[in-house]
Amino acid sequence: MNAHLQPTGSAYFITKDTQETERHTLSVLVDNEPGILARVVGLFSARGYNIESLTVSETEHGRRLSRITVVVIATPKVLVQIKLQLERLVPVHKVHDLTAEGASLERELALIKVAGSGDHRAETLRLADAFRAQIVDASVESFVFEITGKPAKIDSFIALMQPLGLVEVVRTGLAAISRGPQGM
Amino acid sequence: MAEQMTGAEMVIQALTDHGVEHVFGYPGGAALPIYDAMFQQDAVQHILVRHEQGATHMAEGYARSTGKPGVVLVTSGPGATNAVTGLTDALMDSIPLICITAQVPTTLIGSDAFQECDTVGITRSCTKYNYLVKRVEDLPRIMHEAFLIATTGRPGPVVIDIPKDVQFALGDYYKPDLDTLRHQSYRPQLDGDAAAIEAAVDLMLKAERPIFYTGGGVINAGPEASEHLRELAELTGFPVTSTLMGLGAFPASNPQWLGMLGMHGTYEANLAMHDCDVMINIGARFDDRITGRIDAFSPNSRKIHVDIDPSSINKVVRVDVPIIGDCERVLSEMVRVWRSRTNQPRTEAIGAWWKQIGTWRAVNSLGFKNSDTVIKPQHAIQRLYEATRKQGKEVYITTEVGQHQMWAAQHFHFDQPNRWMTSGGLGTMGYGLPAAVGVQVAHPEALVIDIAGEASVQMTMQELSTAVQYRLPIKIFILNNERMGMVRQWQDLLHGSRYAHSYSESLPDFVKLAEAYGGKGIRCSNPAELDAAIAEMLDYDGPVLFDVIVEKDENCLPMIPSGKPHNEIILPDTANIGDIIDEKGRQLV
C-alpha cells in the first residue's frame, strides 16, 4: 500500500563494477582434510563468486595434499580477491592463477552415451574416430564413448552427438597444469 | 614427555598450559566430562553465564581488554548455535576466541541425536578456523594449534568441537610444540616489506596534507603498537584520526587528535580524509561506514595501507603503497626509517594544512543544544566521562549498538588502548552488558561501564544475574529514549518519518528489575540531579542499572548520509534531516 511512496534508500553504497569479466583457471594446493572442499566452496558462495568448474582429488598421498582446479568468471579486481581470500584459509598452501601466469595445459574427460541404429550408428562411429573418442562400452543399440581434450573439443563432440541419439553425458571438470619445468 | 589422561582432562591441561585463567561457559549433557574435569581443579575458573551468546561476548570483552584470547565452553546443539552470534562478532572485529563446543558421541554423529547439530558446518563461515576432533590422539595438537591460529596473524575465533566419547577416551597429552602442528600452510606475514616501508616514508616526507587513519589493527598488535603510533605522530607532526575500533590507540587528549572518522565522525576528521594528499592507513580496512561513497572517497590522495591480512589490501579502495605486516613491527620500522631521514617534524610544510583543520574544528561538529528540563544523551555521556576521570581507577567502557554507541564514541575520550569495547563490524545489539562482565572478570579493581540503550540492553539483560553471582560491580548506564534511536533516525532520514516498530513499548521498570536481580537500580530524568545520580552509581560497590531518561528524538550528528561523500556531512544545526537526501540518494541500495 506504500508502493506509491518514493523509493527508499538504505545504509549501503554500491558502486557498479565497470570492469569486464574474464575466465580464469586457478590451481589450489590444500591439505587433504575433512571439510576442505566445503571450506573452499563455502567461501565462493559466501562472497558471491561464481564457480564454472571444480575438480578435486588427492595428488600427493604421502603429504596428504590435494589439488583443486577451479574455473571462475570474474572481473580482474575480484579475481585478485578470490586468490587472496583462498590463501587466507588455514589449510590452503598455494593458489596459482594459471591463466594469468602464462602457458598452461587444460584437459577434461567425458563419458558420453549414444543410442541408435542404422545410419546413425555408422555416423556416430565415424565422428568418434575423428575426435579420437574411445568406445568403452557397446551394445547392439548403444555406445559409451570416452573422450579427453580441451573443454571446447568435448563441447563440439557432444553437439555433434545430439542429433545422433545422445542419451547422457558425464564430465570430470577441468584439470590444468602449467607448462615448462616449474611445479607449484 | 607424554602424560596419559582423558580427553576432558586434556582440555583443562591445555587451557592451563596456555595460561588461561577464566572460561565463560554453560554446561549440558555432551559437555559433562569436561565440566567434571573442571570441577576437580583450581587453575582455571569457570564463569557460569545465563545464555551462551553472553559467554561469547564476555570472552570478547575479556580478550579486547587484556590482549589475551577469550575462552568459551558450551554444550552441543543449542549451546553451539547460541554461540554463533558472538563468534561472528569476533570474526568481524578480529577478536581472538577459543570456543570449545561439546558434541554428541562420534557413533551418534549424523543420526539426528538429542542436542546434535552440525557445529563445524554451522560455524565454518563464522570462525577463522574450526575443528571436529574425531580421535583423542588429535586433541592435544588441535588445542595448541587453535590457540596459535586464534591469536596470531589477524586474530579471530576458533571452534573446537569435541564429541563426548572423545572427552572420555584416554590418550597421551603433549605440551605445546609448534613443530607438531598439522597446518604448515598457516604462516602469517609479520614483517612489512622493507622497500614498501621506505616508499611509504618517502611519500610521508613529501606530504603537505597528510593524515593517519588508524584502526583496530593497532589495538590488536598490542600496546607497543600504540606507543609506536604516538612516537610516529610526534615525529611527523601529522594529524591522527581513527575508526570506531581503533579508539584509544592514540590519546584523545593529544592536540593532533581529530576525533573519530566515518559516518558519525567529526567534521574535521572526515574533511581531512577527503582533502588529504597522503593517507596513512594503519590497521583499518576501508569499511563502508568509513568510506561513504567509494568513488568520492578521498579523491586526490596517495594511499598507504598497513594490514596483516593480504585480502584487506585493494578489497574496497585501491591503494598506492600496500604493506602487509603486523602494525607493531611496521610502525616501529616506519619510526626507524623516518628518523634515519630527518630529525624534524614537518611543522612548516604542513602549517597551512593544520590551519585548514583549525577552521574545520571551529565548526564544533559535536556541539549540541543542551537543556535544563530534559537530559540530552550527549550531555549524560559528557557528565559520565567527567565523573569517571575523578575516580582514580582504570576505566573501561563497553557499549551496545545504536545512537548511544556513537555518542559514547564521540563524547567519551580514551587515552589508552584496550579501554573501549564495542561491536563494530557486526553491530550486535546486546554486546555491551556481557562484554562488561568479561572485562570486569579480567580487571576486578577497575571501573567498568556499559553505555547502553534501553532496547539493546534487553537483548542480553539476563547476564546481570551473572554479574550479581560473581560480585562483578559493573555499571550499566542506559540512555533511555524509549526508541530504537538509530532506527528512528534512519526512518526520519529516508522513510518519511514512518516509525515502523522503532519504539520501546512495555519497558520494564529498570530500577525494580535491577533490584529483582539483586543489583542496585537508579533512575534520573532531571538534568540538575544527573551529577549526583552518577556519583551514587559510581560509589555503589556492586552492579548498578542506571536508567537515564533522555530526550526522545535527539539525532546522532554529525552524519554522512546515504550516497554522499565525506564533504557533504550533516552538521548538528540541521533542522530537519528528512529533507537532506534527494530522490537519487534514496534510490541507492
Image (cartoon, grey):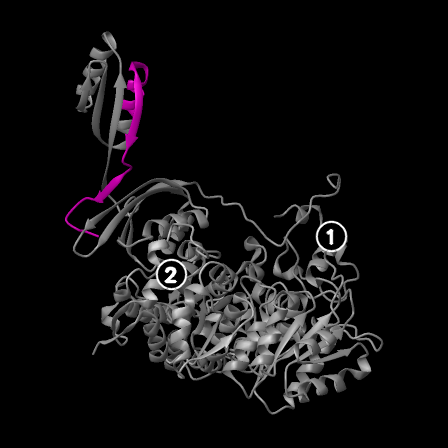
Q: Residues within 10 Å of mark 2 (few under 14, many from 20)?
A: many
Q: Which mark is residue B130?
A: 2
Residue ID at (74%, 75%): B512
Question: Does the magenta-highlighted stretch encompass residue A157?
Answer: yes
Task: Decide which of B3, B371 is in the foreground and name it.
Answer: B3
**Image side of residue B163 versus residue B550, left or right:** left
Task: Decide which of B89, B523 is in the foreground and name it.
Answer: B523
Q: Mark 1 falls on what kind of element?
A: loop
Q: Residues within 10 Å of mark 1 (few under 14, many from 20)?
A: few
Residue lying at the far left in this picture: please name it.
Answer: A181
Q: How many marks?
A: 2
- For mark 1, what is the residue? B500
- Where's residue B127, x and y in %? 43, 61
> Disc 1 marks which amino acid?
Ala
Q: Mark 2 falls on what kind of element?
A: strand
> Disc 2 marks which amino acid?
Asn
Location of residue B171 (image quadrant):
bottom left
Question: Does the magenta-highlighted stretch encompass residue A115?
Answer: no
N-term mark: 2 or 1: 2
Residue lying at the far right in this picture: please name it.
Answer: B373
Whole-number angstrom distance, CA of label 2 to CA of label 1: 39 Å
**Image side of residue B324 versus residue B360, left or right:** left
- Where's residue A48, x and y in %? 46, 46
Residue segment shown in magenta: A156-184
